[in-house]
């Protein structure tokens, strides 16, 4: 019986693989690298532009982050960022614009459910655990630092 079951498993795997196109790993990694690098180049362009305008330090870093978050959210609203992500994979998810996309996408998708239960609640479906972990880790490190400083 186990030999027959093993044969069914092989047949099923062959059947499933007939519908699944083979993955082109090099092409996928290259696209992710190029798109992620391009997003970082856009951020660096804004950094140089704002540095030339006179911003320095934390003001400069914060302003560049806000610009990139705005661009990611704006492109998500237009439906462009999802097409970029479909072709680029992790190259579009890793930078800060990918985080903006993960917050804006569910909010746009569930806007028909209302402002509070749709947009506001669903906005943190994907990004919520990241935010909770960041706040919790920051509080734990701060408490540890305070206890060690005593």
Image: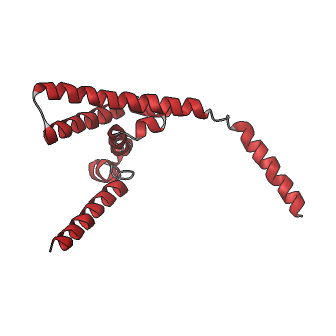
Residue 3, position in %: x, y? Answer: 89, 59
Q: Please state the horizontal and vertical placement of residue 48, each as a whole percent of the image.
A: 21, 26
- Tell which of 7 and 110 is nearer to you: 7
Please name the residue shown 34% across and 32% down the image: 40
* Residue at the left extreme, as displayed: 54
Q: In the image, what residue occupies the spot 30% across and 57% down?
A: 134
Position of the C terminus, as image quadrant, is bottom left
Q: Quadrant of residue 141?
A: bottom left
| Nearer to the camera, 25 or 2 | 25
Could you tell me which residue is drawn at 55 percent across and 32 percent down? 28
Residue 15 placement (x, y as % from top left)? 77, 43
Q: Is residue 83 visible?
A: no
Task: From this view, report whether residue 59 is shown above or below residue 34.
Answer: below
At 60% from the left edge and 35% from the top edge, which residue is drawn?
Answer: 25
What percent of the width, then of the height, locates residue 35? 43, 29
- Residue 94 lies, with reference to residue 133, above or below; the image says above
């Amino acid at each position: 019986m186990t030999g027959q079951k093993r044969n069914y498993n092989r047949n099923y795997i062959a059947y499933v693989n007939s519908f699944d196109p083979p993955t082109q790993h090099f092409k996928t990694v290259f696209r992710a690298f190029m798109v992620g690098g391009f997003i970082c180049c856009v951020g660096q362009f804004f950094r140089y532009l704002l540095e030339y305008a006179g911003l320095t330090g934390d003001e400069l870093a914060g302003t560049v982050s806000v610009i990139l978050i705005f661009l990611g959210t704006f492109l998500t609203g237009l439906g462009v960022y999802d097409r970029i992500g479909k072709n680029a994979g992790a190259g579009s998810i890793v930078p800060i614009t990918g985080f903006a996309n993960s917050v804006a996408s569910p909010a746009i998708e569930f806007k028909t459910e209302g402002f509070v239960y749709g947009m506001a609640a669903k906005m943190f479906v994907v990004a919520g655990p990241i935010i909770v972990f960041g706040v919790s880790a920051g509080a734990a490190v701060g408490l540890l630092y305070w206890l060690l400083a005593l």
